[in-house]
Image (tube, rainbow, N blue to C red):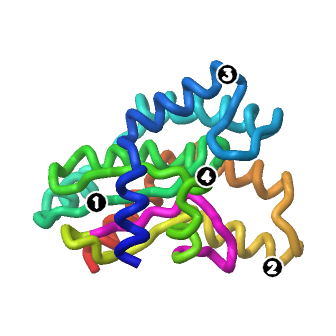
C-alpha cells in the first residue's frame, strides 16, 4: 500500500495546479481523464465555474477554525478526483480552505484515472466514487479517508436509492440544491470529527 501511495503522491499536484489544469483543458474542449465526451466537457465547464465561485465565497466557521488550529502533526491530504465530478466541484474548494488554515496540512490532488491502483484500495460500495480523500501522516500511514460526499449528502443518496432503486436526475438535482444551501458546512463538520478521532 505504501508503494502505491508514494507513486500517487509523486504524480499529485497542488490545488492551484489542479484548478489550472481543469481550466486549461477546457480551452481545448476537454476534461480530465482518458475518456472524452461532450457530456464530460459540459460537466467540467459547469464545475470549473462552481469551483471559481466556491473558491471566492466558501467560509469556515469559527468552530472549524479553532479546531483546525489544534492539529499539530504533519498531514498530507491526498484527494483523488476528476474535473467532471460534480461532488468534487462542491467539496474540494472547501477542503482546500481547511488545508490552507493549518501549515501542518498539505493538500495534494491526483487524478483518479491515473491512480486506479490507489483508488481501488478506497472503493465506496464497490465503486470508484470520487472525490476520495486519503489523509496520511508523515510516514504515509493512513489516518482516515473521506468521500465521496459529506455525511448528510451520503444519507440523502442512500435513502433515495433504497426507496427508488436508482440514482436519477431528480435526486441529482436535489443534491445540487442541498450543496448550494449547505455551503460546505457539512464537509467542515465531517472533517473536524475525523480530525478529532
For marks 4 and 1, give the CA distance. 21 Å
User: Local crowd at mark 2 within 10 Å, few (<14), some, or many (≥20)?
Assistant: few
Identify the residue under disc 4: 87
Identify the residue under disc 2: 162
Identify the residue under disc 1: 76
SS label for mark 1: strand
Rendering coords of residue 78 (x, y %): 39, 58
For the residue pair 55 and 67, the one nearer the viewer reads as: 55
For marks 4 and 3, give the CA distance. 23 Å
User: Local crowd at mark 4 within 10 Å, few (<14), some, or many (≥20)?
Assistant: many
Residue at horizontal 17 percent and vertical 62 percent from the top: 74
Q: Nearer the viewer, mark 4 or mark 3?
A: 3
Rendering coords of residue 95 (x, y %): 39, 51
Identify the residue under disc 3: 28
Q: Which residues are magenta?
A: 122-136
Is disc 2 in contact with disc 4, using a CB cutoff of under 8 Å? no
SS label for mark 2: helix
Rendering coords of residue 82 (x, y %): 59, 47
SS label for mark 3: loop
Q: Earlier in the sequence, mark 4 or mark 3?
A: 3
Amino acid at each position: 500500500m505504501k508503494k502505491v501511495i508514494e507513486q500517487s503522491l509523486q504524480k499529485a499536484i497542488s490545488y492551484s495546479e489542479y484548478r489550472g489544469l481543469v481550466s486549461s483543458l477546457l480551452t481545448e474542449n476537454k476534461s480530465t481523464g482518458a475518456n472524452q465526451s461532450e457530456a464530460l466537457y459540459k460537466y467540467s465547464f459547469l464545475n470549473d465555474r462552481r469551483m471559481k465561485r466556491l473558491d471566492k465565497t466558501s467560509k469556515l466557521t469559527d468552530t472549524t477554525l479553532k479546531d483546525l488550529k489544534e492539529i499539530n502533526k504533519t498531514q498530507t491530504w491526498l484527494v483523488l478526483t476528476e474535473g467532471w465530478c460534480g461532488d468534487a466541484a462542491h467539496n474540494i474548494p472547501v477542503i482546500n480552505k481547511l488545508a490552507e488554515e493549518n501549515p501542518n496540512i498539505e493538500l495534494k490532488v491526483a487524478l483518479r484515472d491515473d491512480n486506479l491502483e490507489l483508488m481501488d484500495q478506497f472503493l465506496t460500495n464497490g465503486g470508484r466514487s470520487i472525490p476520495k480523500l486519503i489523509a496520511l501522516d508523515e510516514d504515509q500511514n493512513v489516518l482516515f479517508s473521506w468521500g465521496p460526499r459529506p455525511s448528510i449528502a451520503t444519507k440523502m443518496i442512500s435513502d433515495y436509492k433504497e426507496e427508488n432503486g436508482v440514482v436519477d436526475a431528480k435526486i441529482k438535482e436535489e443534491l445540487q440544491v442541498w450543496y448550494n444551501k449547505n455551503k460546505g458546512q457539512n464537509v467542515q463538520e465531517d472533517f473536524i470529527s475525523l480530525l478529532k478521532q
